[in-house]
Image (tube, rainbow, N blue to C red):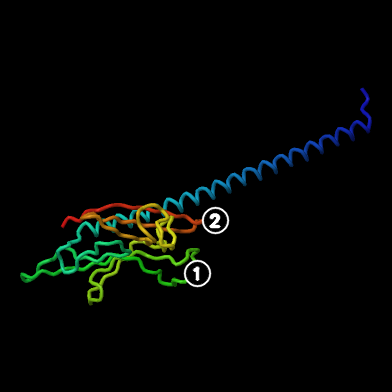
Amino acid sequence: MITTLQDKQARAGFTLVEALIAVSFLVVMFMAVAQVSSRASDAFDEGSAEHALSTGTHRALERLTHALEFANGTGNTPMYPAENDAVTFDTNPSFEGGAAHWTSVNLLAELESEELDDGLDNDGDGLVDERRVVQIENLGAPEERRIVLASGVAELLEGELANLADDNGNGLIDEAGLSFSCEGEVIFVRLTCQRRDEGGRLLVKTAETAVRPYN
């Protein structure tokens, strides 16, 4: 069989086209894999941020519960019986020289250190007017002690608006991101925390519990 120059050129041309198709296919596959990997990475970052927020919120609630369990309503500072964004109480006294020494405890939410209550994000963390939960022992005394239990606390509890109405249907009106209420000897604690994930999406976590002090 005689192979002509035209046949050789056609065969070479087909080879070049096939190579271009193969390269194009590889490029498309690479871009698809990269896109899937990027989405997987974003999903992992979002999941990690949500997990961290949930863990931090529940941990703070546990610490609040632990403090309230040892509240003593018969001390020098009785607990507030109504709805509040803060509670004050005494813990069981220690005895030195035959005298009882009470420790007063304040549980409250205060503005983050660089934040102002002005509807703006003053500290550049993507949150507005956020608070932090603080446990203060012996407020104003030389031995005053402050412990930060949570940061990124919302100004209002999740689903609530400042409109003198019960927007989230929990029976409270305009309750704060940290709120306490009492029914008899039971104290209800509610906490909403926020943070931004790597993509700037606002994450919100709300947790609540009820505790009956031992004393």
Label at residue 65: none
Figure quadrant of residue 14: top right
Label at residue 199: 2
Measured from the top left, where is residue 189 in percent x and y?
31, 56
Secondary structure of the residue carrying tag 1 is: loop
Measured from the top left, where is residue 45 in percent x and y?
50, 51
Relative placement, left or right, of 23 versus 137 is right
Residue drawn at the location 37% of the way across and 59% of the way down: 173
Secondary structure of the residue carrying tag 2 is: loop
Figure check: 154 above or below 33: below
Badge 2 crowding class, 10 Å Cα cut-off, few under 14, some 14 to 19, many 20 or more, is few
Residue 82: tell me if it is visible: yes
In primary-sequence order, the first of circles 1 and 2 is 1
User: In the displayed image of the protein, which residue is found farthest to the top?
Assistant: 1
Residue drawn at the location 39% of the way across and 63% of the way down: 151
Measured from the top left, where is residue 97 in percent x and y?
6, 71
Type of amino acid at the residue the image marks with label 2: Gly
Q: Nearer the viewer, residue 56 or 90?
A: 90
Type of amino acid at the residue the image marks with label 1: Leu
Figure quadrant of residue 167: bottom left
Figure check: 143 above or below 196: below
Q: Which residue is denoted by mark 1 in the rendering?
A: 120
Residue drawn at the location 19% of the way across and 66% of the way down: 78
Q: CA distance from mark 1 to mark 2?
A: 20 Å
